[in-house]
Image (tube, rainbow, N blue to C red):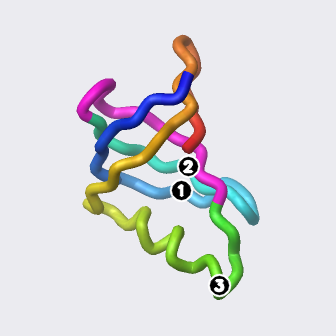
């Protein structure tokens, strides 16, 4: 289920070459972890800049009840 929410980035952990695991504090569900696909090219460097610690962002996530890791 897609859910639009606002969150504050707490911590970013590199997962593999094209993904990061981002811990965020959101208004709907508190502290939650998200899997974010981040292209590693110069053209798309803006997306990785958005996920800096203490950044406040509005995003759509694929929220799955019972899952500990959700997708943005």
- What secondary structure characterizes most of the magenta part? strand
Residue 2: image location, x then y, percent = 52, 29
Q: Is residue 21 above or below residue 67?
A: below
Figure check: 45 above or below 37:
below
**Boundaries of the magenta span:** 27-37
Are dots 1 and 2 in contact, CB under 8 Å? yes
Q: Earlier in the sequence, mark 3 or mark 2?
A: 2
Which residue is identified by label 1? 13
State the residue at coordinates (52%, 69%): 47
Give the residue number, with chain letter if any, for mark 3. 43
7 with respect to 18 (left or right)? left
| Tag 3 and tag 1, C-beta contact below 8 Å | no
Residue 21, numbered label: 2
Q: Badge 2: how crowded within 10 Å, few (<14), some, or many (20+)?
A: some
Q: Residue 51 carries which label?
A: none
Instruction: Measuring from the top left, give residue 44's x and y in whole percent.
Output: 62, 77
* Magenta stretch: includes residue 31: yes
The local secondary structure at tag 1 comes to strand
**Badge 3: how crowded within 10 Å, few (<14), some, or many (20+)?**
few
Point out residue 68 in the picture as x, y percentages from the top left corner.
Answer: 54, 25
The nearer-to-camera label among 3 and 1 is 3
């Amino acid at each position: 289920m897609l859910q639009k929410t606002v969150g504050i980035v707490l911590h970013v952990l590199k997962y593999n070459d094209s993904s990061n695991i981002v811990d965020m504090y959101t208004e709907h569900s508190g502290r939650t972890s998200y899997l974010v696909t981040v292209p590693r090219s110069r053209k798309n460097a803006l997306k990785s800049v958005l996920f800096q610690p203490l950044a406040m962002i509005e995003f759509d996530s694929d929220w799955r009840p019972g899952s500990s890791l959700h997708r943005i």
